[in-house]
Amino acid sequence: MSLALDGLLAISLVVLALQVVTGASLFRSIVMFVVFGLVMALVWARLRAPNLALAEAAIGAGVSGALLMLGYRRLRAAGPEATRPGPRSSRLAAPLSLLVAGLVASLGWTALGLPEALGAAGAAVVAAMPSQAVANPVTAVLLVFRGYDTLLELAVLLVALAGARAVEGPAGPADLAIPTMTGLPIVGALLAALVPLSVLVAGYLLHAGGNAPGGAFQGGAVLAAAGVLLVLTGRLVPHPVPGPVERWGAVLGLLVFSALGLVMLARGQGMLSMPGAWSIYLVESAMLVSIATTLVLLLGAAPGLRRGPLP
Amino acid sequence: MSQAAIYVMAAAAVIGAGVYGLLVAGHLLRKLLAINLLGSGVFLLLVALAGRSGGAPDPVPQALVITGIVVAVSMTAFALALLDRLFRETGQARMDVADDDD
Amino acid sequence: MTTEASLVGLVFLPLLAACLLWAVGQRAPWLRQGLVWLSLLAPLALLLAPTLALTTQPVVEVVLAGHAPPLGIGLRLDALSLLMLWLVAVVGAGAGAYASFVEPPGSDAGTRFWPPWLLLMTGLNALFLSADLFNLYVAIELVTLAAVALVAWSGKGAALRAAMRYLLLAMLASLAYLLAVALLYAEHGTLDLYLLARGVAAGSDTTRIALALLIVSLLLKAAIFPLHIWLPPAHARAPGAVSAVLSALVVKGGVYLVYRIWFWTLDGAQPALVANLLGALGACAIVYGSIAALLQSRLKPLVAYSTVAQLGYLMLVFPMTATVASGALAWKGVIYQLLSHGLAKAALFLAAASLLRGVGSDRLVDLAGASRRFPLSVFAVGLSGISLMGLPPSGGFLAKWLLLEAAWIQRGWVWMAVLLLGSLLASVYVFRALSAMMATPGDDAKAPVDAALPRPVPWQMDVAAVTLALLAVIAGFASAPIFELLNAAAPFPRVESATPISERALP
């Protein structure tokens, strides 16, 4: 019975969440968080949201987990006492959280009983899909109907990167210690297999995103993962001065999306309208490059990257 | 109990866990983890509630949550950069949000 | 330039400037200077067409991507948005000009400072032009991230801690906001503020609770008592120009959204209990903030607590809507408070930063003699003080006078007492600051720790502060066109008209 599977997934989610917040060590909590993200991806698949499942697995579990893990590593490198455990005792915490959970549960339960909304945005999207250039409704919402949201979201990614540069100060970020055994042949073989495969998968996700689950965000995250692998194994080393790829790559999505939108405005067809499938793929490709570049720079905590010395 | 109901209850529990984590955590990384959990719970609630009638899946909440995930990742990445600098400058990675600083 | 292009330009000009600044990196300092100056001054020009347009129609809507709500999202401009956009443009130009002397765009530090600044401006403009709850969420996040990065700019431990606290609380508020959005979407299937209004009247308790949650999250973002704890450290420790923008613009975004939801989305269904509660919180903010400002021994925290107090005035409109006449007056009063406080507080923070730079310390005892060494900065402090205290003919005076009148019509004696007490306390802390600056340095004044101090302050920085403060003071004279604009699309009918609020068609 499928509801049993749902129940199992739901229970796993709750148990994992509790493991994250009550984990004995910080490392354990981060690992549990990544597993939580993966179970979440399964839940999205059960809720018939495959695009979301891909995004959660790639970004929510993958990139977030990598960010937290690398952040943890940096803190440990700065000083072992940085990650010492020790929760604050707070007698308010348990009752308050139970109260919040109870309130949300009762609100949710009431909301479950509400009738379906008339004239809803979702129904309007589904009705408008046949006239769209792409068949994937989520891509249509992200790029066409609510493209302005996506554009602002790209700006949020950029401000995270620009903000990280601003708070690092003139001295730049702390160095990330590269593990010493990256010269092993197995590492080279792994990279030789994984990196091209990641590029292929990213390209596929981008291309398929028009008519099947996928999209620029998911593809960008996979590409970023390949980039992070290269950074972690020393094939790409941090550099204090960003090169042209880092500088232009990070803003390419915003520039292309905005430029296209402004051209359409100038031609009287409305700001940010998408004249055809080609425009959607063009913008998504630019977004893929930007998302990947921004995420790699954030993960590597480096203003720029250069090819590292051969091991 | 429908599928939507199961996930709505799970979402409420995850949100509760996130609030607990936020209150109990002293270390800023743990606070970040708790906030990310809270976010996941809210996203789950959004999509589960929107799909409660069991008809065709509604693409709007799915797109909203994808946007939300990217925003959450951006926030996390920035918060980690801030945490790193904070630790390097002050030697402290713990914070009591309710305390009034000097 | 058409109105549509102007509104699009308000969002996209700073955004594209930020992208180009980032892409150019450390090269072409002349290009960077030019981009920053263009972004600071262009909004003032871009707002002319929309202002003209609003004299003939109450609302301007720009459809994006060819799809109107509920299918798509758009830009929406009415009188309130226009006034907020003007405030952003003017304060942004003044504070930005100030900042460009401290962190020149052509310098190395400038490559790290200006992209977040411009993205902050982008987010603010997007916020005031948006009518979609989720679009507002993304705009708010953009503003928050940029603001936190700028608060942490100095890299000192205290600033970093203040920034982290701000970030954590802002993230919590955003998640509460999203929770409310989830509930509202589940019931109504739309995220457009105006379409939601149609459903709210017939909506269930879930809708009301969701809207309450939304308002609470926005109160946290607007630092309304008792959710204000993040504001004083953050605003006190940020660089001067950043504090100016934070106090004048960023927190006002939260208040603006509360107004939108209360007066437009909840039109006709506002619970009186909540109205009085919000008013009470405002009253507490005024008293607590003013007293806390009095007790500060340094200038910047004093100014930050003054912000907490002055934001309280903005909450007083909610309980004063019992009658149409008082509501109309209170509405005009708080809008004027929004504008004149924005101008005056920005000027005050800029002047405080100048004094800090010149004297080397912002402790009030160390500022003795500042009136002779830095007369322009102290003059700016005095001018902004006039507006904060509510002396005529400043905008602050007009705001408080209108609120007093509204309270009188409604026989709200408590509110009147709070208003008068607030002005009294404001005078006390303003005079405290001014008298510290005008005192002659005595034998117990600290010797300057650095032989290079006191540094002269470039006159351009003082001009920015003085200009903003002057605008706040003469704002009282400019009320007629502003009220005319407000009348066209206010949530209150003109006093002459007899249509009750709940039966007005939505603009």
Image (cartoon, coloured by chain):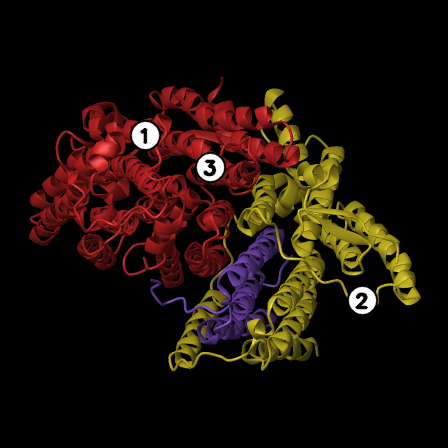
Mark 3–mark 2 Cα distance, whole angstroms, equals 45 Å
Q: Colour of chain A?
A: yellow
Q: Is residue B56 left or right of residue C410?
A: right
Disc 2 secondary structure class = loop
Tint applied to chain B in the drawing: purple
* C65 relative to C232, above or below: above
Indicate the amino acid at tag 1.
Answer: Asp
Tell me which amino acid carries mark 3: Met
- Identify the residue under disc 2: A180
Residue C39 horizontal/vertical position (percent): 49, 28
Q: Are marks 1 and 3 in contact (CB under 8 Å)?
A: no
Which residue is under mark 3? C121
Tally of numbered tags = 3
Chain for numbered disc 1:
C
Q: CA distance from mark 1 to mark 3?
A: 22 Å
* Residue underneath mark 1: C462
Q: Is residue C178 left or right of residue A296?
A: left
Q: Position of residue B89 (x, y in %)?
A: 51, 59
- Which chain is red in the picture? C
